[in-house]
Amino acid sequence: MRIALILIALSLAACGRQAVRASEKKFLADQVMVFDDDPHDSAAQEHVRTNREGAAGGKGAGGGGCGCN
């Protein structure tokens, strides 16, 4: 019983330790992996947000170096 628990713990600890190879990255960048269901709806929502906030871009990472966030 103790050996079985040790084997289970080791197998769970080993999960997720493999890096993604360069040849597999094209599958991760596939359109199916995008969270947006409808790109037109996302673009419309981004347009509304841009007009509401008075800011354009910055959808990825925050900060522009001015210290205003």
Image: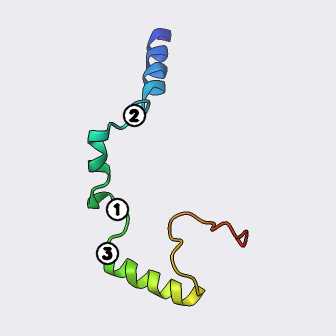
Ranked by sequence position, the earlier of labels 2 and 3 is 2
Decide which of 25, 64 is in the foreground and name it. Answer: 64
Q: Position of residue 34 (x, y in %)?
A: 34, 62
Mark 2 crowd level (few <14, some 14–19, many ≥20, 10 Å Cα): few
- Work out which residue is located at the far front of the displayed protein and give it: 65
Decide which of 22, 32 is in the foreground and name it. Answer: 22
Spatial separation of the CA atoms under disc 1 and disc 3: 10 Å
Q: Position of residue 64 (x, y in %)?
A: 63, 68
Q: Which residue is mark 3?
A: 38
- Report helix, strand or loop for mark 2: loop
Decide which of 1, 68 is in the foreground and name it. Answer: 68
State the quadrant of the C terminus: bottom right
Amino acid beneath label 3: Asp
Write the residue at 44% across / 25% down. 14
Write the residue at 55% across / 63% down. 61
Total marks placed: 3
Decide which of 66, 9 is in the foreground and name it. Answer: 66
- Work out which residue is located at the far bottom of the displayed protein and give it: 51
- Report helix, strand or loop for mark 3: loop
Name the side, left or right, on which 66 lies relative to 35.
right
Spatial separation of the CA atoms under disc 2 and disc 1: 21 Å
Q: Which mark is drawn over residue 58?
A: none
Spatial separation of the CA atoms under disc 2 and disc 3: 31 Å
Which label sits in the foreground, 2 or 3?
2
Q: Which residue is mark 2?
A: 19
Name the side, left or right, on which 10 lies relative to 63.
left
- Report helix, strand or loop for mark 1: loop
Q: Which residue is mark 1?
A: 34
Mark 1 crowd level (few <14, some 14–19, many ≥20, 10 Å Cα): few
Q: Are marks 2 and 1 in contact (CB under 8 Å)?
A: no
Mark 3 crowd level (few <14, some 14–19, many ≥20, 10 Å Cα): few
